[in-house]
Every structure is written in structure tokens, then in C-alpha cells.
Amino acid sequence: MPVIADNAVVCLVCDSPLTVDGDAEKGEIIECSACGQEHELIGRTDDRPEVALAPEVEEDWGE
Ligand SMILES: [Zn+2]
């Protein structure tokens, strides 16, 4: 397990480190530069950011 910075998280898909801006707000989307997966900042625990996989945005909103 690589050591990562306090403000960083690892990609939930490929384990690459993702850097989260210190002033990033909940709901911010962080894209993994390695695999392109988007993550949504869902909150912070003890100053560490927590992310979840961002829902895939469908361009077609109709039924
Ligand atoms: Zn990734």
C-alpha cells in the first residue's frame, strides 16, 4: 500500500492516487488521470477526503 498524502485518496478502480483539492467541496468530481473514472467527494473523515464512484452521467435523460 503506497503512502499517500493526507489530502489524497486512491482510485476505487485502479488504486492510483488521486489528489483532492483542499478546498474541494462535497459533490466535487475528481477524475482519475490513470483510468478516467470519475469520483464524487462525499465528505471528509478526520480531514481525509472520502470519495465514491460518481454515477455515470447518461446523455439521454428521456425514457
Ligand atoms: Zn483510476
Image (spheres, helix red, strand yellow):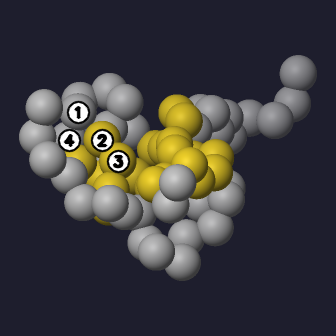
- Residue 15 numbered tag: 1
Is the residue at mark 2 in contact range of ligand 1, meaning its CB lies under 8 Å from it?
no
Which disc, if any, is residue 9?
3
Q: Label 3 crowding class (10 Å Cα cut-off): few <14, some 14-19, many 20+?
A: some
Q: Residue at x 11, y 40 (%)?
A: 2
Please provide percent x and percent y for residue 10.
30, 41
Pointer 4: what residue?
16
Quarter of the rendering containing residue 54: top right
Circles 3 and 2: CB distance less than 8 Å? yes
Q: Position of residue 63 (x, y in %)?
A: 88, 21
In which quarter of the view is residue 52 placed?
top right
Q: Residue at x 37, y 30 (%)?
A: 12
Dots 2 and 1: beta carbons under 8 Å?
Answer: yes
Q: Does ligand 1 reach within 8 Å of label 1's beta carbon?
A: yes
Where disc 2 sits, the SS reads strand
Q: CA distance from mark 2 to mark 1?
A: 5 Å
Rendered image quadrant of residue 36: top left
Pick whichever of labels 2 and 1 is earlier in the sequence.
2
* Left or right relative to 39: residue 55: right
As drawn, which residue projects farthest toward the left?
2
Q: Position of residue 6 (x, y in %)?
A: 32, 60
Sooner in the amino-acid sequence: mark 2 or mark 4: 2
Residue 10, numbered label: 2
User: Is the residue indicated by label 4 positioned so its CB lies within 8 Å of ligand 1?
Assistant: yes
- 12 in relation to 48, above or below: above
